Image (tube, helix red, strand yellow):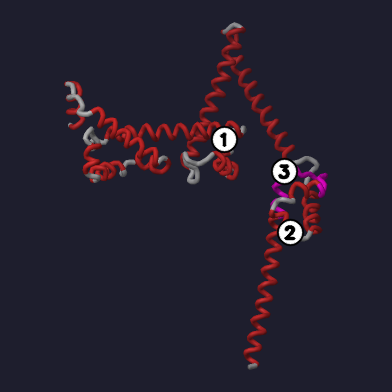
Amino acid sequence: MRDREDLFNEFVGELHKKEKEERREKKEKAKKDFLIMLAEQTSFTRKTKWSSAKKLLENDDRFKAVESSSSREQMFRDHVEKLGDESLSDIEEEAEREKRLAADAAIAARQREVEAELGDKLRERDLESALYNITTNTCRNLEKKRRDAFFSVLDDHPKITTQTRWKEARRIIQDEEETFSKVASNSERKVERDYRDWQEMRHDNAVREFKDLLKETKIITYKSKRMIEENEQHLKDILAVLENDKRWMRMSENHASERDRILDEYIEVLHRKGTPPPPTQQERERRRKDTV
């Protein structure tokens, strides 16, 4: 009887110890999350007041997770004490301005180089026109290279497809700054425009290539619609041929319903056209060469 009581007391003691440790870990996690939340606030400076910060943060779950109001305030004061008098957004804005000035200076330097090269070969009006064209073409080429690189990153990204909505894609682009910083535009509006252009281009390419695949698939003829209506095995035979082609797979990944509609329409068009006319001599010669 005494042994059972000792075991029970030992169990209760361990349970209390575990609960105490869990409360400590929960409190520690809440503190870490609170500090992360503070670090995310780019508008805070050394001069930011707790009353103003509290209004901004009080709806955040990480704010509420720290139950002690005095602990929140103390962590806030410790945090802002380490900050400068300028907010992070002010610093970033200044850095962006300096970046633009450096770019303008580089273009101006290039213009001066061109002027030196051209010298007296062109009249003043021709010189201005040439400089304008050089600068414009250089910027256009750089922009095209950047855009192509951005498209390439999107093509290879495991989390982004042509069906990914812009809201989700924007979150991924912002989270993976190291991946996208060198290829994405500085303007969010332009990034969105580039992204939607990429979606449209890749979709159009996939549809065009899929239609080419259908034209190349010899098993699909003007008889196919009637044969499918009589026996579904013919449709299975068609799909068995198509499913091994990467152009079918691309449409299957992102545009399955559109893929099926295009296939149905293609079979219907062939059915309406009926028996194709006999090949011309030129076509017969081309086919003969293709089989050699």
Q: Secondary structure at mark 2?
A: loop
Residue 13 position within the rendered picture, expressed as x and y whole percent measured from the top left: 68, 80
Kind of residue indicated by mark 2: Val
Q: Residues within 10 Å of mark 2 (few under 14, many from 20)?
A: many
> Mark 3 or mark 2, which is nearer to you?
2
Seen from the viewer's position, the closer of residues 74 and 255 is 255
**Is 288 on the left-hand or right-hand side of 53?**
left
Give whichever of discs 3 and 2 has the lower sequence position: 3
Residue 96 position within the rendered picture, expressed as x and y whole percent measured from the top left: 68, 33
Q: Is residue 208 magenta?
A: no
Q: Return the residue at label 1.
A: 184
Q: Which mark is residue 66?
A: 2
Q: Return the residue at label 3.
A: 42
Q: Which mark is residue 123?
A: none
Residue 255 seen in this snapshot: yes
Cα distance in 3D space between marks 3 and 1: 22 Å
Kind of residue indicated by mark 3: Thr
Give whichever of discs 2 and 1 has the lower sequence position: 2
Cα distance in 3D space between marks 3 and 2: 21 Å
Residue 250 seen in this snapshot: no
Kind of residue indicated by mark 1: Ala
Seen from the viewer's position, the closer of residues 100 and 110 is 100
Read off the magenta span. 34-51
**Residue 17 position (above or below residue 279):** below
Give whichever of discs 3 and 1 has the lower sequence position: 3
